[in-house]
Amino acid sequence: MIPNKENIKHKINQLDYEIKMLENKINEMSWQRTKYQQFYEKCSAGKNNSKSV
């Protein structure tokens, strides 16, 4: 059984949608990681400053 062109086109559209959703999720995770990294660095810098006083 060979899928017809409409089914193939639908599958392509479905995959495009899933790719876009995954890209959005990756961007969200990357943003969260950046914020955690900034917070960690800020906390680490604060601890280093208090030790040197």
Image (cartoon, grey):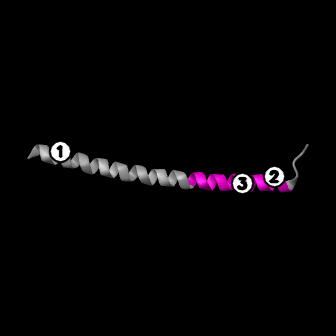
Q: CA distance from mark 2 to mark 3?
A: 10 Å
Disc 1: CA contacts within 10 A as few (<14), some (14-19) or many (>=20): few
Q: CA distance from mark 1 to mark 2?
A: 59 Å
Which residues are drawn in magenta? 6-23
Name which of mark 1 and mark 2 comes first in the sequence.
Answer: 2
> In the rendering, at what x and y percent does residue 30 appear?
46, 51
Image mark for residue 8? 2
Instruction: For the residues labelled 1 and 2, say whether their Cβ atoms are less than 8 Å apart.
Output: no
> Quadrant of the image for the N terminus?
top right
Residue 7 in magenta stretch: yes
Taking 14 as reference, is 42 left or right? left
Q: Residue at x 41, y 49 (%)?
A: 33
Which amino acid does the dot numbered 2 rest on? Ile
Taking 11 as reference, is 4 left or right? right
Disc 3: CA contacts within 10 A as few (<14), some (14-19) or many (>=20): few
Which amino acid does the dot numbered 1 rest on? Asn
> In the rendering, at what x and y percent does residue 13 appear?
73, 56
Q: Main secondary structure of the magenta part?
A: helix
Image mark for residue 14? 3
Q: CA distance from mark 1 to mark 3?
A: 51 Å
Q: Residue at x 72, y 54 (%)?
A: 14
Instruction: For the residues labelled 1 and 3, say whether their Cβ atoms are less than 8 Å apart.
Output: no
Identify the secondary structure beneath mark 3.
helix
Q: Quadrant of residue 24?
A: bottom right
Q: Residue at x 65, y 52 (%)?
A: 18
Taking 31 as reference, is 6 left or right? right
Name which of mark 1 and mark 3 comes first in the sequence.
Answer: 3
- Residue extending farthest to the left is 53
Q: Quadrant of residue 10?
A: bottom right
Front label number (1 vs 3): 3
Judging by the rendered image, the residue that carries numbered circle 1 is 48
